[in-house]
Image: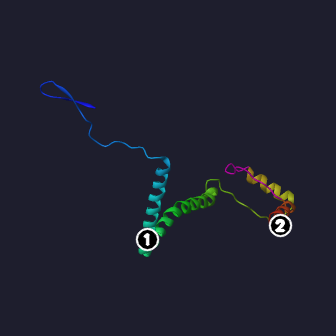
Amino acid sequence: MATDRRPTGDPRKVPNKGANHARSPVKAQARSYLDHHRKVARDAAVRLWKTPVASVMTWTVMGVALALPMALLLLLGSLQGVSAGWESSARITAYLSMDRSREQAAELASSVEDDGRVLAVELIDRDQALAEFRASSGL
């Protein structure tokens, strides 16, 4: 109870006015929750049924909005795979004619490697190249 101060200074008890909070049983709250969601779901289904074109357009926009980030991520992964070789240094593959011997090829590789602009030279002879080709092609 609240007190009311009158100008005369006479405190009187004034009854509380306002809403009281009543506790509902948990079972009743759960039933109310489920009933409310059932009504809302039914209402949503009726609205979807009444406007099928708008509903399909909404679903399409949502599908695109959800699929677009994944598509961009896949595209980015593909582009990174393609552009991975761009950052490395330039490579040159030279094929010698069949009448060149192994010694002549080694001499040519040595002279190319002596050039200051060349970082490394790898000489692969015919037998080794054939073995690598068979291994990679499954022959």
Residue at the (31%, 43%) spot, across then down: 19
The percent coordinates of residue 122 (x first, y second) are 77, 54
Q: How are the colours assigned in the image?
A: rainbow
Mark 1 vs mark 2, foreground winner is 1
Q: In this view, does 129 lie above or below 54?
A: above
Image quarter in which the C terminus is found? bottom right
Residue in the picture at 34% in, 42% down: 20
Q: What kind of residue is marked 1?
A: Val
Pick whichever, 16 or 36, lies toward us. Answer: 16
Q: What stretch is highlighted in magenta?
A: 114-124
User: What's under tag 2, amino acid-wise?
Assistant: Gly
Image quadrant in which you'd find residue 53: bottom left
Q: How crowded is mark 2: few (under 14 residues within 10 Å), some or many (20 or more)?
A: few
Main SS class of the magenta portion in the image: loop
Q: Quadrant of the N terminus?
A: top left
Question: Residue 72 at x, y = what percent?
Answer: 54, 61
Q: Mark 2 points at which residue?
A: 138
